[in-house]
């Protein structure tokens, strides 16, 4: 599935739907970790809410035809992973609670060892990386699994390990490219390293940040630095798709990021301003000015007349009417 987000499209779908799962007013900022790489030791346990008061799931009548009784579920590793994969592949960005109930029930019955748990997270994570619209649903599933009594902590740990490994790989390549390649070649090189996966990682990180909480009900402060670094990579790439994603993500999580790290947000916007005045193309300047307005409007969705102005201007630029 293509993850390209056209100008004026994509809003309100997988990326922008972050705003639908904003943290509750009771969420607090927590954690002293400044970097995902250095902040996930083996004893880092308070990754998501631990709802120890949750009992076993009771299957409602409407799900009895969808979920097999325990005695009929094949919990052998290969068959189990295949069943979970099939259910997940059928889900879309607007999955309903009943769809999530099916996966949670199946997982509760069969994921009884470390390998099963790891495989479930991998299936969810990999689909989220290649399908931006699915990322929100994927994180919602992970959030549910992280609250399963006893094994919830294992799900959170495996999820963060996957995020940590991919972020580290992308970060290392990004730094290498910036040091060894001329600036004009940066875009080609960063795109050559599975750029679609990179965009999926950024969107998934932001969904985790705005959806999941620590055991104390605090926001995922450990993800703040990695998210800012990924947003800077989107800015550096400066393609229309990447700037559209940057626009949508800042509307969704910009306010929370600004509350958590106002200095880092100021640094990001200083880089945006420099990019505007240092000879960027008209198309790039149009995208970046719209992002500046998002901050000026207190991170809220821009009024339709302003959005229409930028969409029309971008269309004129593409048509060669603006230079």
Image (cartoon, grey):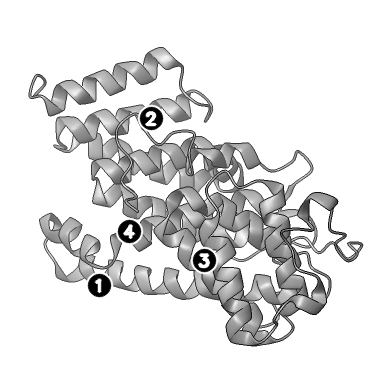
Disc 3 crowd, CA 10 A, few/some/many (<14, 14-19, 20+) = many
Residue beneath label 2, please? 292
Q: Nearer the viewer, mark 4 or mark 2?
A: 4
Mark 1 vs mark 3, CA separation in Å: 26 Å
Q: Is residue 56 visible?
A: yes
Q: Which residue is mark 4?
A: 196
Q: From this viewpoint, is residue 41 visible?
A: no
Q: Residues at badges 1 and 4 in contact (C-beta under 8 Å)? A: no
- Rendered position, 249 above or below 148: above
In this rendering, position of residue 197 left or right of residue 40: left
Q: Give the number of the disc on residue 218.
A: none
Q: Which residue is mark 3?
A: 125
- Crowding around mark 2 (Cα neighbors within 10 Å: few <14, some 14 to 19, many 20+) is some
Residue extending farthest top = 305
Q: How many marks?
A: 4
User: Which quadrant holds residue 200?
Assistant: bottom left
Q: Horizontal and vertical percent for residue 124?
A: 55, 65
Q: Is residue 57 shown above or below 300?
A: below
Question: Which element type, helix, strand or loop, lies under badge 1?
Answer: helix
Q: Say which element carries label 4.
A: helix
- Between marks 2 and 3, how big is the CA–CA gap? 32 Å
Element on which disc 2 rests? helix
Residue shown at the point (23%, 60%) measured from the top left: 191
The mark that comes first in sequence, 1 or 3, is 3
* Disc number placed over residue 176 in the picture, else none: 1
Q: Are marks 1 and 3 in contact (CB under 8 Å)?
A: no
């Amino acid at each position: 599935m293509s993850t390209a987000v056209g100008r004026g499209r994509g809003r309100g779908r997988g990326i922008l739907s972050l705003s639908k799962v904003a943290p509750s007013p009771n969420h607090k900022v927590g954690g002293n970790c400044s970097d995902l790489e250095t902040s996930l030791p083996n004893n880092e346990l308070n990754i998501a809410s631990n709802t120890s008061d949750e009992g076993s799931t009771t299957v409602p009548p409407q799900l009895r035809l969808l979920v097999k009784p325990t005695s009929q579920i094949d919990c052998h590793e290969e068959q189990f992973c295949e069943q979970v994969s099939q259910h997940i592949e059928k889900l879309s960005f607007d999955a309903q609670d009943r769809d999530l109930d099916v996966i949670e029930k199946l997982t509760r019955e069969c994921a009884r060892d470390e390998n099963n748990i790891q495989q479930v997270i991998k299936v969810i994570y990999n689909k989220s990386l290649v399908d931006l619209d699915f990322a929100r649903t994927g994180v919602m599933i992970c959030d549910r699994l992280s609250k399963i009594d006893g094994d919830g902590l294992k799900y959170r740990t495996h999820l963060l390990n996957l995020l940590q490994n991919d972020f580290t790989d992308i970060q290392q390549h990004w730094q290498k490219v910036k040091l060894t390649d001329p600036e004009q070649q940066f875009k080609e090189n960063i795109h050559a390293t599975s750029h679609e996966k990179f965009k999926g990682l950024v969107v998934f990180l932001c969904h985790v940040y705005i959806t999941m909480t620590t055991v104390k009900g605090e926001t995922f402060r450990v993800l703040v630095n990695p998210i800012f670094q990924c947003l800077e990579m989107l800015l550096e790439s400066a393609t229309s798709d990447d700037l559209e994603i940057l626009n949508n993500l800042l509307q969704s999580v910009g306010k929370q990021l600004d509350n958590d790290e106002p200095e880092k947000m100021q640094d990001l916007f200083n880089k945006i301003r420099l990019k505007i005045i240092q000879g960027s193309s008209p198309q790039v300047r149009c995208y970046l000015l719209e992002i500046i307005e998002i901050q000026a409007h207190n991170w809220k969705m821009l009024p339709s007349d302003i959005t229409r102005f930028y969409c029309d201007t971008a269309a004129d630029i593409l048509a060669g009417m603006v230079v």
